[in-house]
Amino acid sequence: MITLSASEELQYLVDFDLLSKLVVGIGEVSDITGVPTRQIRYWEDKGILQSTKEAEGATRKYDYLSVKKILLIKELLDDGYTLDAAAKKVEARMKNVNEAFMKLAKPTKDEG
């Protein structure tokens, strides 16, 4: 039986390289999340989201983490949170998850 380190297991569970390449236009994000494009633009204007634009006037595009953030904010708004409270809660949640994954990705003293 092959035993994998925590970082190797993480690579199999989450393909970070693939996720970093997943970028979709604002229309697709709207279709995927059910959040209107106008609302997505508003959230971006408020600094809650950040799109990637290749040139001025180009279509706004969003990566995997932005789509996830939109879904989480929408869920909290549906539960009665204000936009600002939902954005703060999602930011804190994503920070905690990121820190946990970073700890998993670091080799322990026993591994290396």
Image: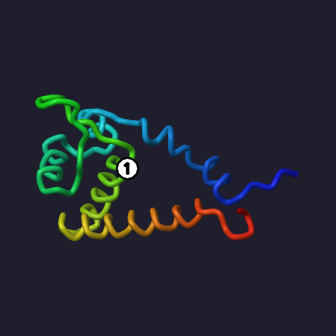
Q: Nearer the viewer, residue 44 or 27?
A: 44
Find numbered disc 1 in the image and state the secondary structure of the residue it sits on.
helix
> For residue 51, which quarter of the picture?
top left
Q: Residue at x 24, y 33 (%)?
A: 27
Give the answer, above or below, for where 112 lies relative to 52: below
Position of residue 81 in the picture relative to residue 1 (left or right) = left
At which x and y percent is residue 105? 58, 59
Q: Residue at x 38, y 67 (%)?
A: 93
Q: How is the image coloured?
A: rainbow
Q: What residue would you read off at disc 1?
A: 65
Q: Nearer the viewer, residue 19 or 5?
A: 5
Tally of numbered tags: 1
Local crowd at mark 1 within 10 Å, few (<14), some, or many (≥20)?
some
> For residue 54, which quarter of the picture?
top left
From this viewpoint, which residue is outermost toward the right? Answer: 1
Position of residue 21 in the picture relative to residue 80 (left or right) = right
At which x and y percent is residue 97? 46, 65
Quadrant including the C terminus:
bottom right
At which x and y percent is residue 41? 15, 45
Q: Residue at x 37, y 51 (%)?
A: 68
Q: Amino acid at mark 1?
A: Leu
Q: Residue at x 34, y 40 (%)?
A: 32
Give the answer, above or below, for where 13 lies relative to 26: below
At which x and y percent is residue 30? 26, 39
